[in-house]
Image: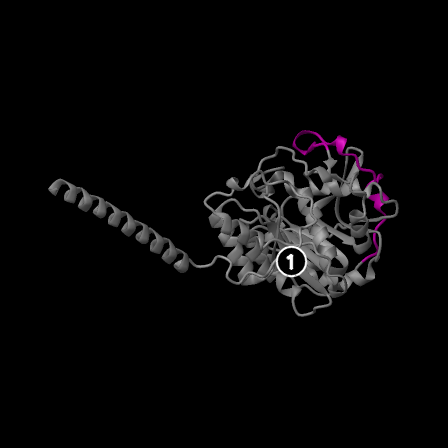
Amino acid sequence: MIYNKRRVIIVALIFASACAWMVFVYFTITFHNLERPSELQNAPTWANTTPIVLMAPVKNQTEINDTDDSDINETFHQLIDFKDLRRNKRAVLLLIIVSTAPARFERRQAIRETWWKHCFGNQTQVECVFMTDGLITDRIQRNLILNEKDKYKDIKLQPLKGGRGQFGFRFLNQIKWAAAKFNFQYLLRMDDDYFLCPKRLLFELPLRPKQNLVWGSFHCQIGITWVDEAFMIFSEDIIQKFLAQNESSMLCHPQADQQVMLWLNSILNKTYFHDTRLHHHPPASHVPRFSNISNVCDSYLGAHGAYGETMYYLGLRANDNAKDHSAIPDFAKFCKTTKFDHRAFRGMWRHEPKPCKDNPTWDLGDEMWFGKEVGQGM
């Protein structure tokens, strides 16, 4: 009898302990969820549409480390959508898209504190946005970019993971978004290490061709020509022709400039403007002239490779305003051909274009491209 009572007491104690442990776990989890700050507290609502976008696929959600389903859903709510605003599109003379990697905060901040300030004040003239990859695997980096986006309101997140093989897809996403959201006359796509003289450019744009224009720093080598993707201006009709390509035959390439030239091959009437006022190479930060130049916008429209302090220096010595300008020079005097053939490239620049509709990959890795700042791609 005593033995049975002991057994009942032991069973009761075990049951009570189990109940107490379950209550403790429940309240611990509940308290943690209530106390954890929302990473996207002020996030705008994502359009309730599926993005019509060609992008490199995410292999699976388990690749997004140290996260859970709610983190993934919140991140996706931050990505750009491609819903056409139609009559509600904002009309601007120039739309500037600065392509940037998530980790490049210092470069974005240098731009914000220099020429970016001219992007504001005249709503019909110019709109400036940073565009970066939104499918960020590192939780700390993801939170940093979301906080920066919320603070500055000038960053758009693409549904891409990043890496060397994504430059062509980035450009395609950028122009699809631009055409859906803005009535622009010109679009400028540029890198985040480019110093720009926006006042000089905005004064000059109305005097340039309104159609068939491709403006930038061109290369002329090995029997072909191509515009460098660090700075590319297109008139609106060129962008529309890009987007009007047959989906079954549209080709993508890991390098945006080669992809652009492949598309331009099928456009008969186009004006190539090779602008010698764009300093392209070597990087401006590696050229002594740019460390003591005065009134840089008197001589230049922009300078590539303005890293760190060089961007701030040029910003202080810009003298950016309306300038005299010349007619577009005869492209034949710079390069005897307007043809492009990707097969002329060798080594790390040689890749076969593939149909965009297949979301192709080129096995170039997910690592960030560091570029000429560290001697990459020289």
Residue 24 visible in the snapshot: yes
* Nearest the eye: 297 or 247: 247
Q: Residue furthest front?
A: 1
- What SS does tag 1 mark? loop
Residue 187: x percent and y percent? 74, 55
Residue type (three-letter) at the residue carrying disc 1: Ala
Q: Residue furthest bottom?
A: 121
- Residue depicted at x 54% and y 42%: 61
Rendered position, 323 above or below 28: below
Residue 300 visible in the snapshot: no
Residue 79: x percent and y percent? 61, 53
SS majority, magenta: loop
Find out whether residue 342 is within the magenta segment: yes
Rendered position, 164 above or below 192: above
* Nearest the eye: 202 or 252: 252
Q: Which residue is denoted by mark 1 in the rendering?
A: 47
- Residue depicted at x 82% and y 61%: 207
Magenta-highlighted residues:
326-352
Rendered position, 151 above or below 72: below
- Mark 1 burial class by Cα count in 10 Å: few <14, some 14-19, many 20+: some
Residue 257: x percent and y percent? 72, 42
Picture quadrant where residue 318 is located: bottom right
* Nearest the eye: 364 or 135: 135
Rendered position, 259 above or below 308: above
Find out whether residue 230 is within the magenta segment: no
